[in-house]
Amino acid sequence: MGARLHNRIPGLDHDAFDAHCHHLLVREALTGQVVGCTRILTGDSAPQAGGFYSQGEFDLGSILSLPGRFAEIGRTCVHRDYRNGATISALWSGIASLVAAHGIDYLIGCASIPLGQDGMQAQAIYAGLAERYLSAPELRVRPKTPLPRRDGIARADYSLPPLLKAYLRVGARICGEPCLDEDFRVADVFILLETRQLERRYARHFLDRAA
């Protein structure tokens, strides 16, 4: 994707949040190769990390005032050859176990969408998301670097990124307009998932397949 990684080790994506996160890995059974990963930053650990990662992109005042315990999901990545139901299921199984162990009420995080030329693809995808998956007005967040608006955006039939699609399938909501992430050259939308409202048919599907 041409991301600009501000790291001492070229090509390795790591940052100051990593030391404070739980890291979940999915390995290929025969080779042991890591084929999927994600990290979880709990609300208990967030103060030591300087806050949640998404607070660097959005004003989360409306979200963090909610009663309950938070955890942030981020840096999720699945090897291109393993982007199938089994790998995503295994990740969700680990996430669900961590949510239960820590009594998490809300999962939050940033989900990326491709910019396309002049941000037009991101604007078109967001327009479609806003029609079906936008949160209640009182749960909206404000991007610190808004994606520049373009007039006359055509409603094209762009596919949702698989990871964002997986979040939406388990009941996540989009909490407002995207933020421009210049380092990764994408637009990020903020997602909120109330864990007790997980759509049961999807949660059961993921967990059963990972068992």
Image: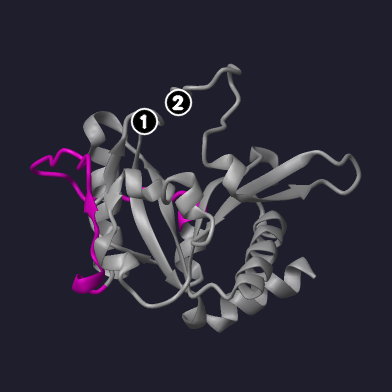
Q: Say if 33 sits above or below 47 in the image.
A: above
Q: What residue type is labelled 2?
A: Ala
**The magenta stretch spans residue 170:** no
**The magenta stretch spans residue 158:** yes
Nearest to the observer: residue 143 or residue 50: 50
Disc nearer the start of the sequence (1/2): 2
For image coordinates 25% across by 48% down, the residue present is: 124
Q: Say if 208 sits above or below 89 in the image.
A: below
Residue 39 seen by the camera: yes
Residue range in magenta is: 136-164
Residue 134 seen by the camera: no
State the residue position of label 2. Answer: 3
Q: Say if 149 sits above or below 59 in the image.
A: above
Nearest to the observer: residue 191 or residue 88: 191
The image shows residue 161 at horizontal and vertical percentages of 46, 49
The image shows residue 70 at horizontal and vertical percentages of 47, 66
- In the rendering, which numbered label is found on residue 96? none
Residue 185 as seen in the image, left or right of residue 42: left
Magenta stretch, overall SS: loop
Residue 117 as seen in the image, left or right of residue 18: left
State the residue position of label 1. Answer: 185
Residue 10 falls in image quadrant:
top right
For the rendered model, the colour scheme is one colour
Label tally: 2
Q: Is mark 2 on a helix, strand or loop?
A: loop
